[in-house]
Amino acid sequence: MPGIGPVLATTIMLGTGTISRFTEVGDFPSYCRCVDSRRESNRRKKGEVDTKDGNKYLAWAFVKAASFAMCLCLEARRFFER
């Protein structure tokens, strides 16, 4: 993948562990801090949610990978600009 080299691949692999431990589809992005943490019911906010849950190293790795992909891959840059 553009933007993911040996260091980021190793960080993602070791930080993720066994992928089967994430039972729901949204559990992995949430663990990686790649999605907003919101707690809502009936379109109303229900208290504050700790945004520091999850793996900070995976969050760092995915941000770096996206940044590198923007520099290395024209298709990724077009997608981001759109």
Image (tube, rainbow, N blue to C red):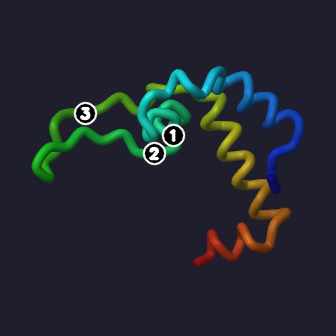
**In the foreground, 23 or 72:** 23
* SS category of the residue bearing label 3: loop
Task: Tell us which disc is closer to us: 3 or 2.
Answer: 2
Q: Position of residue 12 (x, y in %)?
A: 71, 32
Q: Is residue 73 left or right of residue 22?
A: right
Q: Taking 12 as reference, is 81 above or below it?
A: below
Task: Tell us which disc is closer to us: 1 or 2.
Answer: 1
- Which sits earlier in the primary sequence, circle 1 or circle 2? 1
* SS category of the residue bearing label 2: loop
> In what quadrant of the picture does the C terminus appear?
bottom right
**Residue labelled with disc 2:** 35
Which residue does the image show at 64% across and 26% down from the upper left?
16
Q: Position of residue 43 (x, y in %)?
A: 14, 53
Mark 3 is on which residue type? Glu
- Which sits earlier in the primary sequence, circle 3 or circle 2? 2
Label 1 to label 3, Cα distance in Å? 19 Å
Mark 1 is on which residue type? Pro
**Residue labelled with disc 1:** 29
Mark 2 is on which residue type? Val
Q: Are marks 1 and 3 in contact (CB under 8 Å)?
A: no
**Residue labelled with disc 3:** 48
